Amino acid sequence: MKLSIPVKIAIISGMVTCITWYLLALKMGFYSYTYYGIRLLIMFGFIFTGVFTSVILSKRKVGGFFEFKECLKAGMLYTIILALIVAIFNYVYHTFITPDTIDFFCSDIKKTGLEHRQSQAIITQAVEAQKNSFSSFRLFPPALFSGLVFSLLAGAILQKNNPNKHIVEK
């Protein structure tokens, strides 16, 4: 079975993304708030560059003619595969690499809430929101949405319809 260009690029990008995230966590510390913001920017950067790369290379492979829907398909295929790899890595990261991360951030929220004399209800609500933010598939919807936007943009910019298509189909 031969993999398509967007799938190959997504697998490579997913592996590079995960390695980058891990090395960044080693450098910044596993319990850094800044790490999670930078990690999100890295993911969006890989989605942007990967969507355009997938579309450009797929377009070259078929001789330079690539309709809008084919651009969209290539970009979204790349995004879905990358988002799945990121979700799986997120699960592995929070389950095996740093299993106490969620507890660390939740205790930090409790401590901050108590220092600011917030009610127990507000602290509990903030802790629950923090726990939910560590879901393995939390990044999946924003990744798909940004991939859709970048795919639409790539399709609008890079599409090129074959003027002889009607002749070829006859």
Image (spheres, helix red, strand yellow):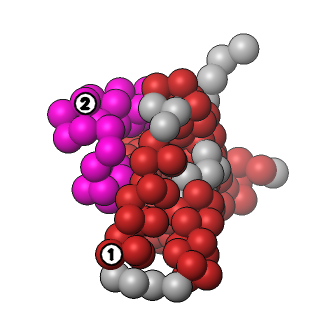
Sequence-wise, the earlier of marks 2 and 1 is: 2
Residue 44 - label: none
Quarter holding the N terminus is top right
Q: Secondary structure at mark 1?
A: helix
Q: Which residue is disc 2 drawn over?
A: 26
Q: Nearer the viewer, residue 140 or 1?
A: 140
Q: Main secondary structure of the magenta part?
A: helix
- Asked whether the viewer can see residue 111, the reply is yes
For the residues marked 2 and 1, what is the alpha-carbon distance in whole angstroms? 29 Å
Q: Amino acid at mark 2?
A: Leu
Indicate left or right for 22 with 152 as reference.
left
Residue in view at x 62 percent, y 51 percent: 135
Residue 72 magenta-drawn? no
Q: Nearer the viewer, mark 2 or mark 1?
A: 1
* Structural crowding at the residue carrying mark 2, measured as other residues with C-alpha within 10 Å and reported as few (<14), some (14–19) or many (≥20): few
Depicted 55 relative to depicted 125: above or below: above
The segment highlighted magenta reads: 12-40
**Outermost residue toward the right?**
170
Indicate left or right for 124 with 37 as reference.
right
| Place of residue 3 in the rendered image (x, y in percent of width and height, measured from the top left) | 63, 23
Residue 115 - label: 1
- Asked whether the viewer can see residue 76, the reply is no
Q: Nearer the viewer, residue 71 or 93?
A: 93
Residue 17, picture quadrant:
top left
